[in-house]
Image (tube, coloured by chain):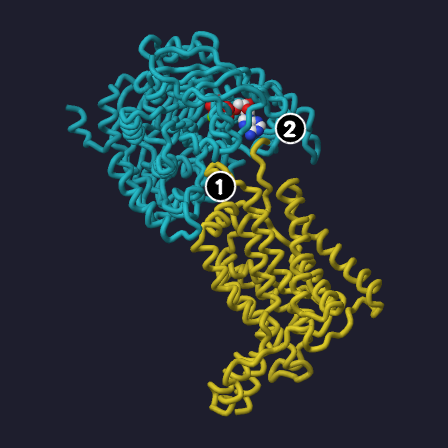
Chain colours: A cyan, B yellow
């Protein structure tokens, strides 16, 4: 048997009343890629942060390479050759790549020599692993994919032998994810040990050697990847059978509820992001917009929902035009039956410091049922929130909890419950399952199909091709701001993939 | 040549009046760049001025005064650090508290020790940082223009003045050329990044507030041992706040901080110069207006002309990793 790189014994950790890790045992073999999966809030990030010394365990023991060690701070972990790419990047936004890489590993008191050394070392790492990034670029100007490279470079620069990656692919396009996996394979071939956290079971099957499953703070199983299946893993994670493919009947499209005509949108730098797009969404159908992230989907959503100014074109909601000057009143649109689940739940969808019940009705707070004369009817609001918690299985079931303390999947359910329960005519959904675990994905997909069957017009924008294919009745493919093709739900993945890559319609059809 | 001479005089007092601002603003720069907002510059400067005046009066040594000023103001900075770094308290409340403590205790202690209505005894020349003449200042005095600039404007200031100006490039160098500076800037932007890089956030921030203490101590010493001959109650007169305005105005960068302080110092010098003399077209300008000008200028310029002043991103927020 291979050597053990890391062994965790009886690790427990609580945050106040939340038991994030309960008595966890885990063994990781040297020179392997070890996957860790689990529902949102299962405690994966917490466990890894303990291993990295960012949090301290309440109880338990850590062995590295057979020796019991104490890891009180990240510097202890770094000294033991452990590196971590965090779920939320730990970068200084207004520093250059180079400055971020050397931070904490400068060597000398003066920067000049350490920067020169880091520059040549970075060049070597870039060459060896194909991790290209301009060392003098400022982090905030870089897309997330590149920011992640910087995080990996940081760990490698410190000489990490054990690399922890916490949901690295959540922010990556499929091509970027493939590139990342090639790098991980290469690191493994060099004898490094890799711990990979992800919600995407396909990635687990494709790249890991072993996989461990966590549920509600406990470690429930460890399997050899070759001897397990996606179905088994999903069941272990959620504790029940999960339908990975939603079942749905034929769509029965009705009247056109949302019509987009010749829509053109520019971003703040004046670059055309949406180029003369036209399409319709009818009652009782789900129209999916597929595309690699960054091809104008965000700007399209913003323009349709009246948040961003459009250069030209019209959007019609149930026969009435939507104000496209960028000054549309969201309350008015909501009243007219347009509900919106934004792509970015943290910045746009929720006010994180608010209590759950407040977020559960925010935006609809002018409705009579939430009001008591000029005041909010707190009782009614909380009762309403409790109902939604019950119906959408939001956990923990506490309407008074701060929204920030819910896990990502549950936060997403809060937004969905708010928008879906208003009985809208048109539902616009951006990336509904980003960073969400399989159990919650199943639930969200079912709810979207329900909405369709109730005769709503659903516009779904997602970078997850599987999601688009399993939910949509019609698939529109967006590339460089233009609609490059329309396909039925049975279109093959490779055909859609080619369209998404900008290969011309004719060629793709061949 | 009369106009030129008055210009030199105004500029000369500009330098004198901007030094306490400059030292205090540089002090604030260290702390705020590390993410600890410090509204207590005023209080630390005042306590420093008092300590310098008292120690110099007792020992007869200006250097002892400077040492005492630094010690007391480092102590107050550590109190602020203890409240806001270790105990993650509200930084504004802690800073205001320090201002109150300094304002009250300097008067009480001054009265108890020296019985001169809150003043410290007037100091003789050796117990002060008096002005020093640079080499050849006398010799070149008669050279037109340049000679006068050298002997009147550049020469003839106290050691602390020259030190303050040298601290500007020094601070820049520390901030942008040393490991400490890199970490200091990082911790003010994203303490979690510093923490995960294996550096202690608390220790780093404590070192930053100690730097602040050293510099506010110097600023206070300048007031009581260089600009004046002893401590007078409330002698900072809001300079700690003007220094804060200069810091914001300069977007927390050392060289612009110097220019901002010189500008505010100039307004002050100009106000003193034109006091009582009506200006053409405008007439008599109330002195209160001139005193308010730095603040008005900061607001107006920040509102429209020099763009947004983005403070260090983690400024004012205690670092908490477990919610
Ligand atoms: N710093 C913190 N303070 C308080 N509670 C926390 C903190 N970090 C995590 N928690 C709580 O601990 C539990 C486990 O969280 P953790 O982030 O480890 O989950 P996860 O498995 O990584 O989930 P996800 O897939 O959403 O990233 C959650 O209930 C979370 O709300
Ligand atoms: Mg996580």
Identify the residue shown where x is 24% and y is 19%.
A492
Q: Distance between the residues labelled 1 and 2?
A: 45 Å
* Residue A413 in view of the camera: no
Q: Where is residue B148 in the image (x, y as percent from the top left)?
A: 51, 86
Mark 2: which secondary structure?
helix
Q: Do labels 1 and 2 share a chain?
A: no
Identify the residue shown where x is 47% and y is 12%.
A238
Q: Where is residue A95 in the image (x, y as percent from the top left)?
A: 42, 48
Chain of the residue under the numbered disc 1 shown in the image = B
The residue that mark 2 highlights is A370
Q: Position of residue A302 (x, y in %)?
A: 42, 38
Question: For residue B194, which numbered disc appears in the image?
Answer: 1
Q: Which quadrant would residue A495 be assigned to in this image?
A: top left
Q: Is residue B177 above or below residue B82?
A: below
Identify the residue shown where x is 38% and y is 47%.
A96
Q: Is residue A111 above or below residue A31?
A: below
Quarter the N terminus of chain A occupies:
top left
Closer to us: A25 or A44 = A25
Q: Is residue A16 above or below residue B278?
A: above
Closer to us: B194 or B52 = B52
């Amino acid at each position: 048997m291979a050597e053990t790189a890391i062994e965790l014994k009886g690790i427990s950790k609580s945050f106040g009343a939340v038991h994030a890790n309960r008595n966890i045992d885990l063994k990781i073999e040297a020179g392997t890629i070890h996957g860790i999966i689990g529902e949102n809030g299962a405690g994966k990030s917490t466990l890894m942060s303990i291993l990295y010394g960012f949090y301290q365990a309440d109880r338990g023991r850590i062995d590295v390479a057979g020796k019991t060690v104490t890891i009180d701070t990240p510097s202890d972990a770094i000294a033991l050759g452990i590196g971590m790419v965090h779920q939320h990047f730990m970068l200084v936004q207004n520093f250059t790549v180079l400055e971020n890489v050397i931070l904490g590993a400068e060597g000398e008191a003066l920067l000049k020599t350490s920067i020169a050394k880091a520059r040549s070392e970075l060049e070597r790492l870039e060459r060896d692993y194909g991790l290209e990034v301009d060392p003098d670029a400022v982090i905030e100007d870089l897309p997330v994919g590149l920011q992640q490279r910087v995080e990996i470079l940081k760990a490698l620069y410190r000489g990490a032998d054990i690399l922890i990656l916490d949901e690295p692919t959540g922010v990556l396009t499929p091509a970027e994810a493939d590139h990342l996996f090639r790098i991980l394979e290469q690191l493994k071939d060099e004898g490094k040990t890799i711990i990979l956290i992800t919600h995407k079971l396909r990635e687990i099957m494709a790249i890991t050697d072993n996989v461990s499953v966590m549920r509600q703070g406990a470690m429930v199983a460890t399997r050899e990847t070759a001897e397990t299946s996606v179905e088994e893993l999903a069941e272990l994670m959620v504790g029940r059978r999960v339908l990975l493919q939603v079942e749905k009947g034929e769509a029965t499209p009705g009247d056109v509820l949302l019509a987009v005509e010749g829509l053109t949108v520019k971003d703040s730098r004046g670059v055309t992001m949406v180029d003369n797009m036209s399409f319709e969404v009818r009652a009782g159908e789900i129209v999916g917009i597929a595309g690699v992230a960054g091809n104008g989907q965000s700007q399209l959503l913003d323009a349709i929902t009246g948040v961003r100014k459009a250069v030209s074109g019209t959007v019609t909601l149930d026969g009435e035009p939507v104000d496209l000057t960028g000054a549309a009143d969201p309350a008015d649109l909501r009243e007219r039956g347009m509900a919106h689940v934004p792509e970015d739940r943290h910045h746009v969808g929720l006010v994180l410091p608010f209590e759950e019940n407040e977020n559960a009705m925010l935006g609809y707070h002018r409705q009579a049922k939430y009001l008591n004369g000029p005041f909010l009817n707190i009782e009614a609001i909380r009762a309403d929130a409790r109902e939604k918690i019950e119906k959408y299985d939001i956990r923990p079931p506490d309407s008074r909890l701060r929204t920030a303390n819910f896990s990502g999947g549950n936060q997403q359910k809060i937004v969905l419950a708010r928008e879906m329960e208003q009985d809208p005519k048109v539902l616009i959904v951006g990336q509904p399952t980003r960073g969400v675990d399989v159990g919650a994905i199943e639930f969200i997909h079912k709810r979207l199909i329900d909405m369709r069957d109730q005769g709503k017009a659903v516009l779904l924008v997602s970078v997850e091709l599987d999601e688009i294919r399993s939910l949509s009745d019609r698939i529109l493919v967006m590339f460089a701001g233009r609609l490059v093709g329309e396909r039925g739900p049975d279109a093959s993945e490779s055909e859609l993939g080619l369209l998404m890559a900008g290969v011309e319609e004719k060629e793709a059809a061949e | 040549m009369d106009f030129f001479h008055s210009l030199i005089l105004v500029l000369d007092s500009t330098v004198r009046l901007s030094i306490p601002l400059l030292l205090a603003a540089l002090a604030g720069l260290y702390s705020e760049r590390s993410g600890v907002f410090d509204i207590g510059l005023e209080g630390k400067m005042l306590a420093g001025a008092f300590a310098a005046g008292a120690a110099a009066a007792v020992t007869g040594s200006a250097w002892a005064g400077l040492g005492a000023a630094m010690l007391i103001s480092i102590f107050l900075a550590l109190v602020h650090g203890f409240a806001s770094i270790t105990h993650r308290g509200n930084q504004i409340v802690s800073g205001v508290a320090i201002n109150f403590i300094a304002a009250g205790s300097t008067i009480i202690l001054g009265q108890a020790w020296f019985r001169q209505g809150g003043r410290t005894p007037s100091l003789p020349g050796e117990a002060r940082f008096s002005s020093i003449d640079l080499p050849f200042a006398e010799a070149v005095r008669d050279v037109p223009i340049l000679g006068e600039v050298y002997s009147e404007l550049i020469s003839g200031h106290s050691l602390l003045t020259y030190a303050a100006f040298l601290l500007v490039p020094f601070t820049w160098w520390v901030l942008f050329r040393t490991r400490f500076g890199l970490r200091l800037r990082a911790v003010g932007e994203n303490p979690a990044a510093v923490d995960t890089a294996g550096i202690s956030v608390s220790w780093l921030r404590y070192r930053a507030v100690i730097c602040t203490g050293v510099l506010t101590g110097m600023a206070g010493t300048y007031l009581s041992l260089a600009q004046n001959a002893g401590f007078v109650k409330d002698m900072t007169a809001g300079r700690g706040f003007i220094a804060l305005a200069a810091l914001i105005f300069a977007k927390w960068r050392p060289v612009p901080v110097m220019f901002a302080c010189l500008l505010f110092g100039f307004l002050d010098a100009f106000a003193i110069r034109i006091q009582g003399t009506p200006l053409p077209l405008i007439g008599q300008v109330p002195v209160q207006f001139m005193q308010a000008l730095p603040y008005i200028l900061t607001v107006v310029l920040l509102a429209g002309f020099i763009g947004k002043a983005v403070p260090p991103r983690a400024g004012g927020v205690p670092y908490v990793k477990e919610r």
